[in-house]
Image (cartoon, rainbow, N blue to C red):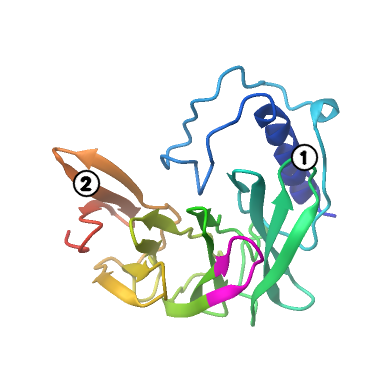
Amino acid sequence: MKPFFSYQILIIGILLFLSNFARAENWPGWRGPRGDGTSIEQDVPTNWDPVGALWKTELPGKGHASPIVWDDRVFTVTGMTDTKQRILLCLDRNSGNILWQQAVVMGPLEKLHKENSHASGTPATGGRRVYVTFRVGDDIVVAAHNFNDGQQFWLVRPGTHVGEWGFSNTPVLYKDKVIIDGDSKGDSFLIALSRTDGRTLWRKNRTNKGISYSAPFIRELDGRTQLIQCGDRCVAGFDPDTGEQ
């Protein structure tokens, strides 16, 4: 077991220990419900003492994605270098037991920075489906799985990702859409897929061809809803309904 991943597992246990006392708000994706790392929880400990963990569960493979929490379920992803599988896991929030694990995709392993992994994109959920992103070879893969049993509903490859440091782009949910940042050294783009079937709802080609590892986030600014994206040499705002910049 790699030290980094053991540490990730330990953090899950501590967070769930806290939420048993006061029902915490759901943490449905990267950096929480508002996409900015803020929480309404009170009395959060500042010391990560392993003695205070409610449970610790060893997971297969290696993954640097953050866990997400919805009600009594915890989801995370892992990559298996031996089988070349990328796996979505669901754990019981109260016990740490693995409820199910589902292979999302199998294929060529992308080139990585030594501190990256083949499962670094944090999943996202709205409580009915779980959405995940991976890079397989040079392809970006986006998939939707059943919240309860892990059954795969759809899988699409909306574009490619070119770069030697690996992939960590994470899905952002908005209304009926799954929004993905596809910035890379190749054909950069921003895309919205249907949460129902994965079809493209809008696609915005990006002029700069440079890697971005920043997840988009959504805010109300100047009386309108905007999708803010930090990219290579630019920060841009988009209409999340249409993709208009």
Q: Quadrant of the C terminus?
A: bottom left
Name the disc covering residue 225, or none: 2
Q: Front-most of 122 and 3?
A: 122
Residue neighbourhood size for the residue with mark 2, other residues' Cα within 10 Å, grouped as few (<14), some (14–19), many (≥20): some
Amino acid at the residue labelled 2: Thr
Seen in the image, is 150 located left or right of residue 2? Answer: left
Q: Residue at x 62, y 25 (%)?
A: 22
Q: Position of residue 146 (x, y in %)?
A: 58, 66
- Residue topped by disc 1: 10
Q: CA distance from mark 1 to mark 2?
A: 37 Å
Residue, far top: 43
Badges 1 and 2: C-beta atoms under 8 Å apart?
no
Q: Which residues are magenta?
A: 145-153
Amino acid at the residue labelled 1: Leu
Seen in the image, is 87 located left or right of residue 97? Answer: left
Q: Residue at x 36, y 70 (%)?
A: 193
Residue 139 visible? The answer is: no
Magenta segment includes 154: no
Q: Position of residue 123 (x, y in %)?
A: 55, 57
Q: Front-most of 32 and 94?
A: 94
Of the image marks 1 and 2, the number of the one nearer the N terminus: 1
Q: Quadrant of residue 94?
A: top right
